[in-house]
Image (spheres, rainbow, N blue to C red):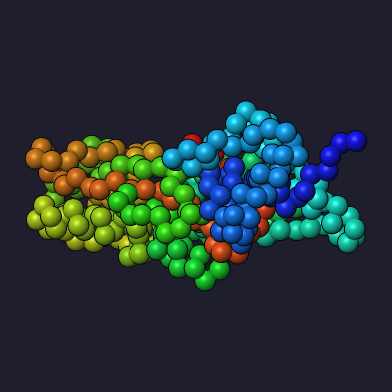
Amino acid sequence: MTPLLDLHQVRSFLAAADYGSMTAAGEILRLSQGAVSQHIARLEGTLGCVLFVRGRRGLTLTDDGERLVQPARSLLTQNDRAWSALNGAKVTRQVRLGVPFDLVGTLLPPAVQSFVADFPDTELSLVCESSPVLLSQLATGSIDLAVVEVPAESGLPNGTAKRLTVEPLVWVGAVGGRAHQRRPLPVSLVSDTCAFRPLVLEGLRAADVTWRMVFDQGNLDATFATVRMDLAVTAALAPCIPSGLEVLATGAGADGLPPLRSVAIDLHLSAVGAQDTGVRELARRIRTLFR
């Protein structure tokens, strides 16, 4: 007779696989690290194999662990469907994802599209705001998870937050434009809460470059429009530069613009969202996309 798998143990296994840490898995599931470790040990005993290799950098799935991930996810999905059938109604999740303006249409679509296709019973809502606003909404529970931009030197607040990548922040201007040569330097940013604003002003002040703000009214399209018209320059992540704009040189050359600090893109889950299987699955897909 085939042994029965304990769903509590399976959930602990998936959480540890997603976050590479039993401590982080415990935070998500509101269990102690010891309880998660015990669940995984018992699951390994039931299956007769080792699922993780423990190392300095956290947990790494073994080949057997890799083979278990997809069946384990399917098992939990079937569990949700069984509860739905028993109650005579669909289980409809609501997942609220916060994304900065510049990332929503550039780096994230593949993860969002695949999630929506695979989870038709989930209502996914997008909230586009600057990163400081998104972090505030995350703290109050207004959104379930958020992709945010912070200075690369910033640390992660807890075990459930993950660093997705670090990208260079560059000056951007109109192709063949001259706005970068004007003084005061005309600058256009999305809003006064833009995550790039402190880094831009820090660089300008350090280089003693005078500047004036042309636009910061909360609209990304309008920001880029002012730059395309050569009314101003802006700052953007290297992978997110739209057509019609080009990267401007820094240093003592013709452009004379100061270098800017790099920006980290982090993924955060709210305390409630971290316990939801739909939220965790979307988070997993976002991490996989950046990986």
On the image, the x and y values in percent for residue 244 come to 34, 39
Residue 274 shows in the view: no
On the image, the x and y values in percent for residue 212 come to 19, 61
- Pick whichever, 280 or 27, lies toward us: 27
- Pick whichever, 249 or 281, lies toward us: 281
Quarter where residue 52 is shown: top right
Question: Is 242 situated above or below 139?
Answer: above
Question: Is 22 situated above or below 30?
Answer: above
Residue 168 appears left or right of 77: left
Residue at 16%, 55% (x, y): give it: 204
The quarter of the image holding the N terminus is top right
- Pick whichever, 31 or 86, lies toward us: 31
Residue 32 appears left or right of 183: right
Residue at 59%, 59% (x, y): give it: 32
Residue 196 appears left or right of 75: left
Residue 10 shows in the view: yes
Name the residue furthest top: 63
- Pick whichever, 136 or 109, lies toward us: 136
On the image, the x and y values in percent for residue 235 come to 29, 49
Residue 184 appears left or right of 224: left
Quarter where residue 57 is shown: top left
Number of marks: 0
On the image, the x and y values in percent for residue 193 come to 35, 64
Residue at 44%, 40% (x, y): give it: 56
Residue at 63%, 55% (x, y): give it: 35
